Image: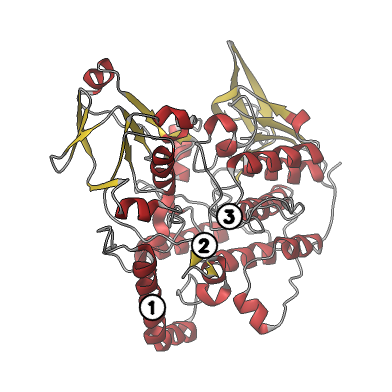
Amino acid sequence: MITRKNVCVIGAGVSGLAAAKAFNARGHNVTIIERSADLGGVWEPARSYPDVQTQSPKELYRYTDKAMPDSYPQWPRGPQVYAYLADYARSHDLTRLMRLNTTVLSMQRRADGKPGWTLDLKTGDHTGREEFDFVAVCTGQFNEPQTLSLPGEDEFRAAGGTILHSSKYNDPSFAKGRNVVVLGGSKSATDIAVNAVRSGARSVTIVFREPVWRIPYFIGGLINFKRILYIRAQEQMFASWGIGPLSRLAHLLAKPLVWANWRGLESLLKAQLKLAQCNMVPKERIEEGVNCSVPIATPDFFPMVADGRIKAVLGTFDHYEANTIVASNGERIAADVAVLAIGYKLGVPFLSEADRAKLVDPDGQYRLYRLIANPDLPDMGFVGFNSSFCTVLCADMAAHWLVRYADKQLAHQPSEREMRDNIEMMLHFKRVERPAAGVYGGLCVAPYHFKHFDELLADIGAKRRKRNLVAEMFTPPDADAYGDFLASAPSYQAS
């Protein structure tokens, strides 16, 4: 018999909703703790910048049991994603489980020796302590905005300047008539730069450390990029973890063809995006950097750089002066608004220092089996830390795996020794064999999402029906199909 647990889900974004639904569906008592005033995570309207849209097509940026509306475009906008998530929460009766405006201050193992954790929570001015049998951490990788303090900030602000993180750039009229300078090379940086031009900024400058490969929504203007970056054939061009001598030999023999494939893609991207004209040709080979940090090319960004509507400066911010930002190369940039598109802090700050040391190595790499569980942190799991090109699908799969892991209902329930051995193998792979896999603390399965899903399904005991070989190799992941696979696993209910 599976005993019903009191489960705390920390976060009400994409991952938190997936975890809450998975545990609630198995009969557990679920409480969702969300520090913001609304659900949605990065898609919460208060945190979304204008013109934000998904990098993944809508058929991949979805849960296995609910498609996005047919009326949505191929790459939905922020308000549409938020509406989809809100509808998902309502349809699974998750909103009643939420405690909004509530922060997890700290957590520690229960003092009475029972399984689970004690959480210190704060809602408004009230603080309290509650115990849970299991905790699902669903704060993800875009939780706490990264900060940057530089000399001259007070002088800059005193002259009327504004400094804000990209997550706070949520009013397009903010840029009108002003000199806007964006720091960063992510998609949010290029999105905001383009939005500032369209919003009537006096000038727009983007300052970035180095050019990176960006993938347009349609490669060559014709081929949807999901047909290249989301297929097994592409994934198998990369040697993955845990492969044997024959597989390594096959990769060695195919190396010239794989090399030619990537050089062809580079040439196509250089021509399509006019990278040489923009002086933004990356130094790194494209295959060496394929991971979760590969950004989609913001439509109109490169044309705006090419015709001078956006000025691109190589470097970073050195310091501020009145109405001016001085770049690291010494260039002085007229500025009224500084937008820091510098990402988010990765971490779990409410864990004790001792527990964080069990979770994260000194070099920042996370110790997570399947990127979901740590054998030294029992009664706890992580959903949404398995980032990929198909984020929502990844979170959904992780949530289904985690509830079975918590209930000891995996078809292959790993021992602590197995988990530790696998973690060490994966850390070696990320540190030595493919350093690009170490991005975001190693919390990235791209470009290996198919292999990751195969492992999760095998652990769960799901029956995976294969299609014909061509479809299997050249079709992106099918969320409906994965829903069917998950439904084939043995069912159970906590009581």
Q: Are marks 1 and 3 in contact (CB under 8 Å)?
A: no
Picture residue at 39% right of the left edge, 72% below the top: 268
- Give the CA separation, mark 1 to mark 3: 45 Å
Q: Residue furthest bottom?
A: 253
N-terminal-most mark, 1 or 2: 1
Vertical arrangement, residue 353 with respect to residue 158, above or below: below
Tell me whether the residue at label 1 lies in contact with that at label 2, contact meaning CB atoms closer than 8 angstroms: no
Q: Quadrant of residue 155?
A: top left
As measured in the structure, the alpha-carbon distance from the residue carrying label 3 to the one carrying label 2 is 10 Å
The mark nearer the N terminus, 1 or 3, is 1
Q: Which residue type carries mark 2? A: Asn
| In the depicted structure, whether residue 247 falls above or below residue 4 | below
Going by the numbered disc 3, the residue's amino acid type is: Glu
Percent x, y for residue 257?
Answer: 41, 86
Residue in front for this viewpoint, 463 or 421: 463
Crowd band around label 1 with a 10 angstrom C-alpha radius: few (<14), some (14–19), many (20+): few
- Which picture quadrant has residue 200? top left
Q: Does the image show residue 379?
A: no
Q: Which residue is mark 3?
A: 416
Between circles 3 and 2, the one closer to the viewer is 2
* Residue that carries the numbered disc 2 in the rendered image: 422
Percent across and percent down for residue 211 are: 30, 56
Q: Secondary structure at mark 3?
A: helix
Q: Secondary structure at mark 1?
A: helix
* Residue at disc 2, secondary structure: helix
What residue sits right under mark 1 in the picture?
264
